[in-house]
Amino acid sequence: APPIATPASPHTALLIVSTTGDGDVPESALPFLKAIRKAGPTPSKNLTYAMLCLGDTNYNHFCGGGARVDKALQKAGATRVFDYG
């Protein structure tokens, strides 16, 4: 397991990501998601994060917004310290 950085570390983030519709990232979160994808691995490789995903179980892609952000962060080289849920 990767080491967990101290909460005061500037390289540690706790993300709370909601989902809208059937697995979409909310419109207000799109600039954040685009910035992660555009930044690539260089600024993200030292980032460790945990994520709480919010969604509605009535949809097929429950917590899909969080899954999209998680995938982008993983691709950019960030390290998730806990499974999201």
Image (tube, rainbow, N blue to C red):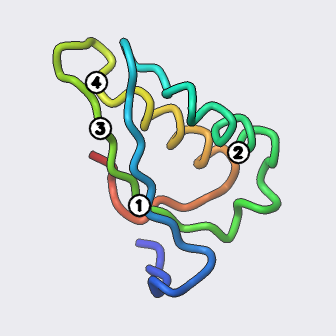
Disc 2 is placed on an element classified as helix
Q: Mark 4 and 3 residues: CB-CB less than 8 Å, in contact?
A: no
Q: Which numbered disc covers residue 36?
A: 2
Callout 4 amino acid: Phe
At horizontal 45% and vertical 55% (from top left) the residue drawn is 15
Q: Which residue is mark 3?
A: 54
What's the CA distance linking mark 2 and mark 4? 22 Å
Marked residue nearer the N-terminal end (1 or 2): 2
User: Can you name the residue that lies furthest to the left here?
Assistant: 58
Q: Which numbered disc covers residue 50?
A: 1
Callout 1 amino acid: Ala
Callout 3 amino acid: Leu
Pick whichever, 43 or 26, lies toward us: 26
Q: Mark 1 and 4 residues: CB-CB less than 8 Å, in contact?
A: no
Callout 2 amino acid: Ile
Q: Is residue 48 left or right of residue 59?
A: right
Marked residue nearer the N-terminal end (1 or 4): 1
Marked residue nearer the N-terminal end (2 or 4): 2
Dot 2 surroundings within 10 Å: few (below 14), some, or many (20 or more)? Answer: some
Dot 3 surroundings within 10 Å: few (below 14), some, or many (20 or more)? Answer: some
